[in-house]
Structures are given as C-alpha cells and as structure tokens.
Amino acid sequence: MNKNYNYAFLDEGSKREIRRSILKAVAIPGYQVPFGSRELPIGRGWGTGGIQITLSLIGPEDTLKVIDQGSDDSVNAVNIKKFVRLCTDVPTTTDTREASIIQTRHRVPEIPMKNDQILVLQVPIPEPLRIVEPREEVTKKMHAEKDYAPIWLQLYESLIKYKKITIGTEYPCMVENRYIMNPSPIPKFDNPKLNDSQCLYLFGAGREKKIYAIPPHTKVTSLAFDDVPFEKESFKGKKCRLCGNENTYLDEMFDSDTGEKHYQCSDTSYCKEVRMKCH
C-alpha cells in the first residue's frame, strides 16, 4: 500500500465527522442524522453512503465482506471490494462469520451476526415518509411530532384495494416505539432480523446525506395493524435448486434454454456453506 495516501481514502477530518454522525445515530436509534457526504470515485446512487461509513470505520485489523442482493460475486460487490482493498489492504472474505464489517446492498445475511460485527447498508432513499410527503421540511416536522398518520393511511388503502399490504421492499419499521425508519430496500423477509439483533446496523445514504442506525438489542417492529399482522414472504413448497434449502430468501430464476422456472438462495455464501456440509 502506498503510504503517501491517507488510510482508507478519506481524509482524517472527513472520517472523524462521519464517525461523530454515527455516534449520534447510535445514540438515537432510527433518527436520520445529516452528514457532509464526500465525493468518491463512484457516482452517487451507487452506494457511496455505505462506502463512506465503511471507510470511516475500517482499520488494519478488520476483515471486509461485501454483498449485493445477497451475492458476493456481483459487479457492485466485486468492485467495492477492490476499491476498499486497494486503499486499505485489509483482507476480504465471502464468509459471513469471518467478517468484522459487512457492507451490503438489499439483503441481510442468512447467518445470524454476532455482537462484534457491523452490518453497513447502502440506502438510496432514507426517508420513509417520502412516499407520502415530498417536502423535507415537512417530513422533519412529522418525525418531531411523531405524526405518522399518512403512512398508516397508505397501508390501510393498500389493504382495502388489494386485500393485503403490497409493500415488498423498504417495508417501514418502528424503532423503539419512537421513529419510523426505512430499513433500506431489503425484502420484508429480512425485517424480523433487525429486531433485538446482536450486531450493529448502520445505514448510509450518500446522495441524501443521511446516516442512521439500529444498535444491538434494539426493538424494531414492522408496521402492522392489530387484526392484520405483518407477514414476510413465504416460499412454501419451493426450495433452492443448489442446496435444497426451503427456509431462506429465494431468487426466482428462469432457464433461457428450457424456459423452466427455478429458485436459488439469494445469499450465495450461505448456500455454499449448506452444500459443503451436505457433502
């Protein structure tokens, strides 16, 4: 590694400012903390918020894992790993258990994480009220007053129109009975993993310049009505074609040659581990 470059790309002042924002976010779970988003050699909207968090926290003793839609081998995951490795020289892994920092886009690993691990999520739109109110000054006031009636109304209208809540990703959560939070575009299958988790969750939105957090053992509840409980995706009757697992989040895939539909584990690392155990 070239010692003429600052460790982890960002300058020390920038990293300190981001870490201060992270500390505030941890102190107020679910609250969106503004921060001065820095320029990176990656277009905003491609995960710069999560990358800035990772670069501000990572040290020589860390091991990094990066996933995109659960995959270790996607273009996004591979290039972020290359970028961080070039400017830090930290080891990378595909094993969830080995990583001290995991940066992810749109998934939470299937393997439960431990209290010495940090999961960093890339977030395009951090504001859960944006779908019902476009004005930033109004959403800030709504959070301050805990005025969440519009989002409850949206869920109710979905029930009336479709007989079920149709939100598949970014399903809103209540954090510690105070703030409604956008859990990032993870599938609602992953929402229960946020509640009372052992690890620290950090959410970074570079374009929107916001950081928020779920500390370990925090109460996180997916919004639901008393008579219509929250339901995650069901893959009953379906299984991964590679490992045979029926209890993970499955991606629906098509064979272009035969035209047949099949399913495969979204979390490639977990799928590989199951197959190794079977053999």
Image (cartoon, rainbow, N blue to C red):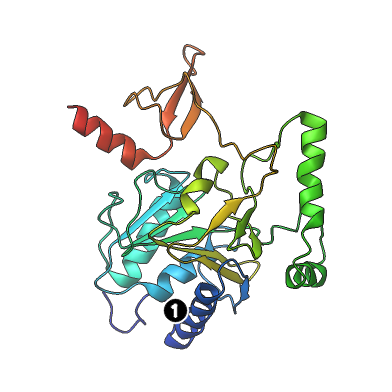
Q: Residue at x 54, y 47 (%)?
A: 186
Question: Position of 128 compared to 237: left or right?
Answer: right
Q: Residue at x 20, y 32 (%)?
A: 277
Residue 107 % position (x, y):
48, 47
Residue 88 showing in the rendered view: yes
Residue 63: x and y, percent?
28, 63
Which residue is at a point 28% across and 78% down the rendered structure image? 2
Q: 115 above or below 109? A: below
Q: Can residue 184 be seen from the camera position used here?
A: no
Q: How far across and how far down the image is residue 167, in percent?
A: 68, 41
Question: What element does badge 1 sit on?
Answer: loop
Residue in view at x 50 percent, y 45 percent? 190
From the viewer's perspective, tell me whether residue 129 is left or right of residue 120: right
* Position of residue 5 measured from the top left corner of the image (x, y, whole percent): 35, 81
**25 to 223, vertically: above or below:** below
**On screen, 149 above or below 160?**
below
Q: Residue furthest bottom?
A: 13
Outermost residue on the front side: it is 226
**Quarter holding residue 98:** bottom left
Question: Looking at the figure, which quarter contains the C terminus?
Answer: top left
Judge by depth and name the residue closer to the eye, 217 or 71: 217
Residue annotated with mark 1 = 10
Amino acid, disc 1 = Leu
To which quarter of the image does residue 7 belong?
bottom left
Q: How packed is label 1: few (under 14 Cα within 10 Å), some, or many (20 or more)?
A: some
* Count of number-bearing discs: 1
Q: Quadrant of the N terminus?
A: bottom left
Which residue, as the protein is rendered here, is positioned at the far left?
Answer: 279
Seen in the image, is 160 located left or right of residue 99?
right
The answer to whether residue 10 is left or right of residue 115 is: right
